[in-house]
Image (cartoon, rainbow, N blue to C red):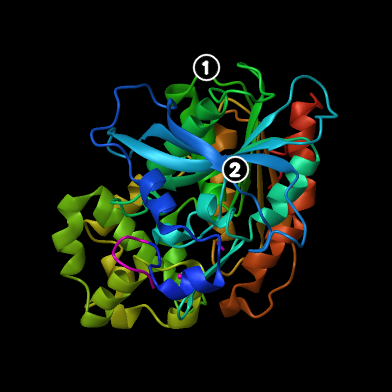
Amino acid sequence: MVIGCTATGFPLASADRDWYPYYNEDEYTEFYTPPNPLPESRPGELIRTEPSRLVLEPSGELGMIMATGTRVMYRSTDARGNANAVTGTYFEPFNDWPGQGPRPLIVYGPGTQGQGDQCAPSRQFNQGIHWSPYLDIAFNYEELFVSTMVARGFAILMTDYEGLGTLGTVHTYVNRLSQGHAMLDAARAARLLPDTSLTPDGPTAFWGYSQGGGASASAAELAPSYAPELNIVGSYAGAPPANLAEMMPYADGSALVGAVGYALNSVIQTYPEAEAAIRSKLTPRGEDLLYKTKNQCVAETLTKFMFRHLQPYFTEPVDEMMRQEPFRGLFELQRIGTLRPNSPVLININRFDPLVPWTAANQLGRDWCAMGVDVEFRTNEQPPFLNKAIVNHGLPMLVDGEPAMQWIADRFNGVPTAPNCGQF
């Protein structure tokens, strides 16, 4: 899974424009404000597009992403079935696709970026590094994989998810339906873009780790009902948070305990009828957590809330509260593994992941296997190390990334799968 800002969602300090010549406040305001009302259109239809500068760092002189970037806003559907607008970035590779068939598309679900609008990957790709005084800093760590993928000929559309980037809506962090819809509609939107090398019915795969792993897994199981026309050949779900209730003890005292604030803000945004009940369980410190994290990127949240315990944020014992309504029902709504994907899935996680439970990811795989899904479950055995610093959550993202990329390439090239249901 893996920064303050103004009420508009991005920094306004003139100091930003002095040191960072590529920051343009008006540009972001204009593009990221959804039309009101939204146009009458189908999920996945494009609302607006514009060219996007792609850099690894602000100057753009220390390397490049080998692709042409297009910033997109497209129509999607929130968790309540209402139309919404989601933004993202499409990457058209300079290199040809060396594999079989037409150029493939990877719909990329990013890991935890934060909850402020300035954290959106589609903004970070044209900044390289985001900063405004004093701790609002974001490094676009997803560019490590994107750079490799486009160099190998994969086209990519990375979604920002609901509310991350777009003004006026709180990011619905780890919401199963919202994220799954955003991924599936990103696949539709990419194939509607003009002047790309994609074919209308070409192959698509989903990719994500941590928050992105949950989004990829959700997209895989929602596809048969929500987007049956898509030609999906596989999904990579790295360290997917398949059961949020099981994560709570893992988050307690960890470097990323502040992500609980993201999750509660997301619940309040999506299910406002539960807001009073949730806030009645918060102490003043809990209210402060929600207020501050709503506008932070992950680096600032790490810096300001790392290693805190959850209990001081709540008026009742956390484990008891999670078994009560509305918390129990709200967490159950987000559990992944109740629907059947119609394409192969690779699940990868470290056995000693200190943030996303191995047991929940394993249960996800077994639930899908029971439905007859083609599942390959891989366990990384990297031993425990500095658990509360979530080393064994972040490092496997890099260690397991290359084998996962090869697995995705095999799906596009028609290589037979190697499911291991009944063996994990």
Q: Residue at x 44, y 27 (%)?
A: 44
Q: How many marks?
A: 2
Front of the two marks 1 and 2: 2
Residue 200 or 71: which is nearer the viewer?
Answer: 71
318 or 113, which is in the foreground? 113
Q: For residue 321, which quarter of the picture?
A: bottom left
Tell me which amino acid carries mark 1: Glu
Q: Is residue 7 part of the magenta span, yes or no?
A: yes
Q: Is residue 381 above or below residue 302?
A: above
The residue nearer to you, when weighing 180 against 379, is 180
Describe the element under mark 2 as helix, strand or loop: strand
Check disc 1: other Cα within 10 Å, few if <14, some if 14-19, many if 20+: few
x%, y% of residue 49?
Answer: 48, 35
422, above or below 363, in the image: above
**Magenta stretch bounds:** 1-9
What type of secondary structure mainly makes up the magenta span?
loop
Which numbered marker is on residue 108? 2
In this rendering, position of residue 326 left or right of residue 202: left
Q: Identify the residue under disc 1.
A: 229
Residue at the image position 51 percent from the left and 33 percent from the top: 186
Residue 173 visible in the picture: yes
Could you tell me residue 21's position as x and y percent?
A: 55, 64
In the rendered structure, are the residues bearing label 1 and label 2 in contact, judged by CB atoms less than 8 Å apart? no
With respect to residue 366, does 411 lie above or below? above
- N-term-proximal mark, 1 vs 2: 2
CA–CA distance in space, label 1 to label 2: 19 Å
